[in-house]
Image (cartoon, rainbow, N blue to C red):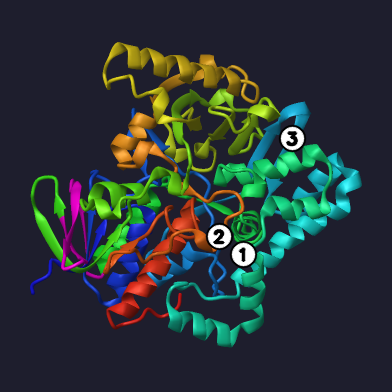
């Protein structure tokens, strides 16, 4: 049979591009099909009136120069494998938290400086603070010693288990632990525990009790090792570099290709049909869509439908893309911020403001004398379903909600309303339209108490159909979906007969 490629990838998100790049470098032919005219999905950039905005993601792990093996520092090792250079700019503060009752916590790259900030506010909790963050450090140390690969690959598991039996057993035990419950073993101060909830909510959109300790160990320890590094040129530089790597080894990323259906033949995934009727065939198909979009939209057989309730659906986002006069941002202002007005509303719609000004690191993102600001809050599709794109009522609703967020942000950036040069607002409807994501959601989350390994893996119930992205282990975030791409490529390469070398 003449295949269009060995492997078809539906969606040029970071997970799909990572899988495609590693498979292509290994000698498999890949064809990545992307609806939009640019790659990256939620990790993309766009330009408007001289400004370059991050469409979604803006805090990035995995770019340290350390070449040691392990599951962390993936971006550096992937790009080294591809022979691609991606310049980055180090950010000395991961996030500056502005919380109720005057609680101000900049999370510095230097771990001791960060811990000192907490201890200064909560001196009676010093022992507990150090013990809790050491628990996260222990997870990091295990993960950074283990090679990245698929947890569904028996050969990989046996090889790692034989080489690192103690670490594998220790990690297995930690997969049953919760970040929040672990914190409560050591800490009793309610305000400090609320801060730890925010540490979790900043990327997981869940409180700490609902967040697996293993996930926390990646995000909240690696920031003090690999650090936070912003890609020069904006978030879109990451998918652009992955596309360069794919093409370097003979692969193809095709834009304007809106997948309508994953085709099945004798119970296996055999190809993809586009909305325009064009058909592509392959030995395997990788879906970068959400679990709901893959099984309820792209697979037409209702036997594969997955109910929304099977997972805890994360909310969507309302996003603000602002071009501002540079003078409104004072000297010493940090790049990334989280702002909460009231503790009992932080996890309600719009309760937490996420804020970044990446042009402070990379001035090329804005015209001279200007800065870019990307701010966003949680939102839900249900609040916008009654509106139609282009109608005046929709514009008024966006303006009203967007302006309310801008006014709240003036708590940390006075005069912002009067410094605006450009302002663009995006609702969950926008997210769904551009990203083809069910209800514009941030993806599926585990219910409280579920083990992190209960997150879907790369294999699916359909033979030769695989999945990557935030619907799969380990979950949300650019470095997490990158891991899903590495894991998927590792599994598929072994199935197709030419296993990957470890990164």
Q: Are marks 1 and 2 in contact (CB under 8 Å)?
A: yes
- Which residue in the protein does label 3 denote? 104
**Near-viewer residue (216 or 367):** 216
Q: Looking at the picture, how far across and down is residue 269, in whole percent?
A: 21, 64
Between disc 3 and disc 1, whose residue precedes?
A: 3
Q: Looking at the picture, how far across and down is residue 342, in whole percent?
A: 68, 26
Q: Are marks 3 and 1 in contact (CB under 8 Å)?
A: no
Between disc 3 and disc 2, whose residue precedes?
A: 3
Dot 2: few (<14), some (14–19), or many (≥20) neighbours within 10 Å? many
Which image quarter: residue 424?
Answer: top left
Q: Looking at the picture, how far across and down is residue 55, in whole percent?
A: 40, 39
Q: Is residue 266 magenta?
A: yes
Q: Is residue 308 magenta?
A: no
Q: Which mark is residue 452?
A: 2
Mark 3–mark 1 distance (CA, rounded to whole Å) = 31 Å
- Which residue in the protein does label 1 denote? 175
Give the residue drawn at x 60%, y 42%.
201
Mark 3–mark 2 distance (CA, rounded to whole Å) = 31 Å
Left or right relative to 282: residue 188:
right
Q: In which quadrant will I find the C terminus?
A: bottom left
Q: In which quadrant will I find the N terminus?
A: bottom left
Q: Could you tell me which secondary element the residue under label 3 belongs to?
A: strand
């Amino acid at each position: 049979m003449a295949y269009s490629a060995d492997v078809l990838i539906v969606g040029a998100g970071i997970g799909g591009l990572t899988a495609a790049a590693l498979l292509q470098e290994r000698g498999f032919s890949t064809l990545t099909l992307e609806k939009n005219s640019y790659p990256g999905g939620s990790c993309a950039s766009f330009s408007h009136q001289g400004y370059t905005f991050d469409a979604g993601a803006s805090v990035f792990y995995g770019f340290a120069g350390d070449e040691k093996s392990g599951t962390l520092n993936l971006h550096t090792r992937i790009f080294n494998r591809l022979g691609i250079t991606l310049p980055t700019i180090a950010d000395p503060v991961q996030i500056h938290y502005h919380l109720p009752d005057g609680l101000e916590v900049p999370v510095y790259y230097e771990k001791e400086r960060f811990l000192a900030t907490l201890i200064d506010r909560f001196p009676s909790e010093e022992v507990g603070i150090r013990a809790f963050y050491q628990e996260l450090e222990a997870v990091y140390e295990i993960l950074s010693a283990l090679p990245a690969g698929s947890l569904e690959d028996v050969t990989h598991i046996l090889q790692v288990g034989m080489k690192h039996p103690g670490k594998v057993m220790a990690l297995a035990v930690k997969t049953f632990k919760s970040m929040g419950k672990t914190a409560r073993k050591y800490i009793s101060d309610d305000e400090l525990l609320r801060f730890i909830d925010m540490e979790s909510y900043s990327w997981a959109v869940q409180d700490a009790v609902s967040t697996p300790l293993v996930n926390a160990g990646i995000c909240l320890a690696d920031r003090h090792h690999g650090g936070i590094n912003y890609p020069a040129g904006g978030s879109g530089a990451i998918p652009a570099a992955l596309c360069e790597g794919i093409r370097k080894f003979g692969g193809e990323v095709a834009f304007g290709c809106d997948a309508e259906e994953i085709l099945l033949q004798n119970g296996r995934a055999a190809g993809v049909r586009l909305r325009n009727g064009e058909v592509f065939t392959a030995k395997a198909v990788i879906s970068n869509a959400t679990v709901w979009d893959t099984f309820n939209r792209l697979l037409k057989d209702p036997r594969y439908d997955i109910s929304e309730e099977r997972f805890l659906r994360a909310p969507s986002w309302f996003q603000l893309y602002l071009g501002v006069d540079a003078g409104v941002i004072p000297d010493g202002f940090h790049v990334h911020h989280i702002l909460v007005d009231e503790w009992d509303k932080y996890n309600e719609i719009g309760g937490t403001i996420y804020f970044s000004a990446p042009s402070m690191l990379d001035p090329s993102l804005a015209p001279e004398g200007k800065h870019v600001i990307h701010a966003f809050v949680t939102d839900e599709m249900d609040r916008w379903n009654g509106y139609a794109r282009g109608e005046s009522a929709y514009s008024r609703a966006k303006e009203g909600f967007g302006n309310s967020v801008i006014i709240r942000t003036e708590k940390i950036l006075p005069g912002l309303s009067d410094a605006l040069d450009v302002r663009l607002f995006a609702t969950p409807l926008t997210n769904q339209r551009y990203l083809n994501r069910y209800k514009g959601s941030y993806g599926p989350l585990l219910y409280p108490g579920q083990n992190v390994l209960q997150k879907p893996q790369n294999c699916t119930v359909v033979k030769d159909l695989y999945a990557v992205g935030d619907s799969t282990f380990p979950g949300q975030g650019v470095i997490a979906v990158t891991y899903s791409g590495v894991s998927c490529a590792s599994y598929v390469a072994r199935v197709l007969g030419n296993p990957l070398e470890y990164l």
